[in-house]
Amino acid sequence: MKKCIFFTILCLSVLIVKSQTPKQEEHFRKPESEGLAHLNALKASYTTKEQWEARKAAVKENIFKEIGLSPLPQKTPLNPTITNKRVYDDYTVENVALEVLPGVYLCGSLYKPAKEGKHPAMLCPHGHFYNNIDKSIPNERGRYRPDQQYRCAMLARMGVAVFSYDMFAWGESTLQVPLKDHRTGLALTMQTWNSMRVIDFLTSLDCIDPARIGITGASGGGTQTFLAAALDSRIALSIPAVMVSCHFYGGCPCESGLPIHQIAGGLNTNNAEIAALFAPRPQLLISDGEDWTSNTPQVEYPYLQYVYDFYGKKNSVENVHFAEEGHDYGASKRFVLYDFVARQFNLDISKIKDRNGDFDESKVTIEPAENMYAFGKEQKLPDNAVQGADAVRKVFISLQK
């Protein structure tokens, strides 16, 4: 039932994108054969590390330009507001509001290990997932979903500080920008900027080891993952789930609404190449058999190994494929995440396993959405909060010099 609901929502998203971009109605989706041919053409265009480095620089420059982050806006004080600390089994949760631009707020949940010390950190953006077709139920979507809470809390119990945060015009962001404006190119710009500002926040905390910053998300959260990882060199570990594909770029304009894949005067890029920009740092691709990542073990993964091999780091990129599973960040996918993070960040994974050596998520407390509101149950914004997408865009542009 959940899978049917997801693909119904995906189809609706595709229809909306088509209605908004009639001249580029299939720019985000290509036949699998065309995606493979494109990937092979890219491989043929760089056969040495030097050629790849030149291509990498050109692709990054193009993404920054097309995504609206060139030049980067001036970074203004985040003025973090941290409230409502809850203490659970070996971890804590606090509500956080960050002023990512003057008068523009990003809300999220900060999970931390109960034990004090210097911890690695993980960013956890969410995707377009629902448990129920009734989209008005706040705790059935976004960072309030149980699977998102399990992921964050288990990482915290293992020794990682985790920040789970809203997509633009989702969750508490809708207090400033209506949900309809999520399906715009501005969302793609803001979500990438927000991830950068989250790293600013996390690295400002005394308890965070700035050399061990990772990011993971599924679906639309997977897109946010490989984009942020490609553009922000402070990220040391990347785990995009059920999203890296050479023939599909995401059905929502918050992923593909700006022409970041088009490169004037040269070969266009795709999401597999964007994920490869992260090389040679450790990366795990999680894929499944029922969506656009069904061919990852045969197509995208060997391509990333090809790029990683330029650095002699072919084994630093991994793929775990769930051929009988669908598009989610379910328990089996979370388990390989925990294992990968523990290995890369040198953590004691036994902390989250039972006596039989199996992962045990039963000690995680699943909270209602109301507990997680950074602006409280009253949902009262600060007095300086701007309203509407146009106002957000105006502030953003004013800081670009």
Image: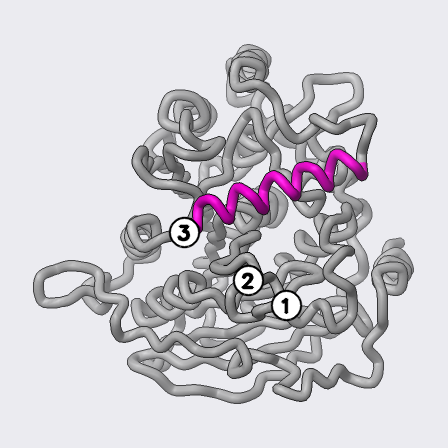
**Residue 3 within the magenta-colored segment of the rendering:** yes
* Disc on the earlier residue, 2 or 3: 2
Q: CA distance from mark 2 to mark 3?
A: 12 Å
Name which of mark 1 and mark 2 comes first in the sequence: 2
- Residue at 81% from the left image edge and 74% from the top image edge: 103
Q: Residues within 10 Å of mark 3 (few under 14, many from 20)?
A: many
Q: Residue at x 47, y 44 (%)?
A: 4
- Our reading of the magenta stretch's main secondary structure is helix
Q: Which mark is residue 292?
A: none
Q: CA distance from mark 1 to mark 2?
A: 7 Å
Q: Give the image location of residue 252, x and y in percent.
A: 66, 43
Which residue: 62% across, 86% down?
Answer: 376
When the figure is inspected, residue 307 is found, relative to residue 159, above or below; the finding is above
Residue 265, quarter of picture: top right
Dots 1 and 2: beta carbons under 8 Å?
A: yes
Q: Where does the image place residue 162, in percent across and percent down from the top left? A: 46, 67
Question: Which residues are the magenta region?
Answer: 1-20
Residue occupied by mark 1: 171
For marks 1 and 3 on the same chain, the one whose residue lies earlier in the sequence: 1
From the viewer's side, name the closer residue of 120 and 377: 377
Which residue corresponds to the image point at 69% horizontal and 47% vertical from the top-left?
254
Which labelled disc corresponds to residue 329? 3
Of 317 and 401, which appears nearest the observer? 317
Residue corresponding to mark 2: 142
Residue 191 locus on image (x, y percent): 67, 55
Q: How is the image coloured?
A: one colour
Find out whether residue 267 is within the magenta segment.
Answer: no
Residue 15 against residue 335 in the figure, above or below = above
Secondary-structure class at tag 3: loop
Q: Amino acid at mark 1?
A: Gly
* Residue 15 is at least partly visible in this image: yes
